[in-house]
Image (cartoon, rainbow, N blue to C red):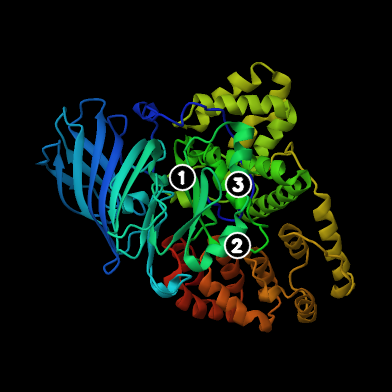
Amino acid sequence: MFKFKNLVLIACILIYSCHMSTTPNNQDKPMTNSDVHSFAKPAEAVVTHIHLNLNVDFENHILKGFAKINFKNITGTHQLILDTRDLKVSKITQGENETETKYQFGEEVKFLGKALSIEVETSTTQVTVYYETSPDAGALMWLTPEQTAGKQFPFMFSQSQAILARTWVPCQDGPGVKFTYSADITCPHSLMALMSAENDTLLHKDGVYHFNMPQPISSYLMAIAVGDVRFHSFGKNTGVYAEPVMMERCIYEFEDMQKMVDAAGDLYGEYAWGRYDMIVLPPSFPFGGMENPRLTFATPTIIAGDRSLVALVAHELAHSWSGNLVTNATWNDFWLNEGFTMYFENRIMEKLYGRDYADMLDELGFNELQETVKELGDTSIDTHLFLSLKDRDPDDGMNDIAYIKGQFFLKTVEHVVGRERMDVFINKYFTEHAFQSMTTERFITYFNENLINGDTASANKIQLEKWIYGPGIPENSFRVKSVLLEKAAAQAKEFIAGKPAKELVTKDWSTHEWLHFLRNLPEGMSREQIAELDKKFHFTMSGNCEILCDWFQHTITSNYLPSEAQLEIFLENVGRRKFIVPLYKALVKTPDGKAFAKKVYTMARPGYHSVAQQTIDEMVN
């Protein structure tokens, strides 16, 4: 998935060669582990398939229709329990004959919603829930034409991770439950509907689209988007959907997508999901990317014009193995998704662009991890890889710890045992657990039995338990130093020492070198220094959102007023949390900044996704 602070590094993966042509049956082995973020009881009755028939109502901002749910009654229970939040249910039937049955909602629980208990016969294997979503459904973002790139048609998209699928589909909304799904979606004739499933590439004049996802996935990977989009193919099984006005830029930016898929396959085995396509969403998408199977959702902020931010594509692609194929069983195990994905991402980038490039990404990531640990506190339980999220929104765990600490744990393991031995282990791990879920506890057992295998010297060097259940960054962490970033930092140091900006050596710098340069400048530079840098490098007018975010943090701290208008435009047109959260955080530190933040947020809030709104509401008010 996306990542709160940085979405640009790695994961790893497998050799699972037979899953392309057949539908796996591993969903017959439901997770029995307790999931504190789900009311469902999959150990008693587990969902195996969902068929959706929904109408997309842009006027009322709702989805309306039914969900036909197949399930396996494991214990002969008389109730099927689903997760819901803000769903309006009109009736529920059971069996193919659709005999109406009784149901009841449980008490409302903050951010979890309500349990939906459905009475069933022990022989029943199917229920049909007739319902509609709330106009305020947490997963669904309804955009006016003015909020899109093209400005002519409305747009709707979903964001189900972590536990928002229940706001648009009645389901067992925990990552440990996997099921297949299909759908019939009706939308306005001028718009195209897409899902995390097998998609058509052409507009349907009747507005009716049919979808099928033959491989079992977790509910957080269910996704839908409806808008004025077109398709461009990059090769045998890759392509991009985007609004027409964005398409030319997308074609240039993602030209290497097929190469990435091929490189990933060379590293860890054949891609398991048929096609790997991407849709570039309007700016209000709150994350860098979301690894919805077959259709990655991506922010337009990665379109920098120089392909410098496409590591995000490698990240979401890597999730096709780590996360989508082998999934964290609960959100406490989130690092099993993201740590592996960050590791693999970096391997893809190294293979395509060389070791120096990968080292830049590694060092930037480690620096961000250090900042996160400093912010949380190096003894905080929130810096453990295995999280403790009971009675908390799982979004609280989606920061650099799971991503980058998880990545550097795996890099440390590789450093100890060697890359060849590491790759053999990873391939075996993903092959043997494909289309299943994994807990941290079971991973530790598998790790010790299949990688360590009695090698106490390596075990002592790795210190696995310290990484997973301990705070901060262990002292034995693998580190990398990027020569290219060292040169960028040296230029920052020379500028602070008095060297004029026009004499700095910055020719052919990548985005990553510019970011390192900006991050090595001190807070609170004089306005004269800020103005000198802006005159030479035109940071305020940059089209690169990564650079703008870091630059605006300096201008806010130094109260550099010439950038204020562009900062306001940025905050009103970009909804990605990675960028807007640190900027609002910097603004609210002073009375004048907080007043400015409140003014801008009043205008910007309607264009932000609910996930972003929740974060900024608490910060600004």
Asked if 205 appears above or below 236 in the picture, the reply is: below
Where residue 593 sits: x, y (%)? 59, 78
Cα separation, mark 1 vs mark 2, equals 21 Å
For marks 3 and 1 on the same chain, the one whose residue lies earlier in the sequence? 1
In this rendering, does residue 393 appear at all? yes
Mark number displayed over residue 440: none
Give percent across and percent down for residue 506: 83, 65
Labels 2 & 3 near each other (Cβ < 8 A): no
Q: Which residue is disc 2 drawn over? A: 303
Mark 3, residue position = 314
Q: Which residue is drawn at 43% across and 30% down?
A: 21
User: Which residue is the site of mark 1?
Assistant: 294
Figure quadrant of residue 26: top left
Residue 45 in percent (x, y) is at 26, 32
Circle 3 packing at 10 Å, graded few (<14), some (14-19), many (20+), is many
User: Which of these two is toward me, 517 or 473?
Assistant: 517
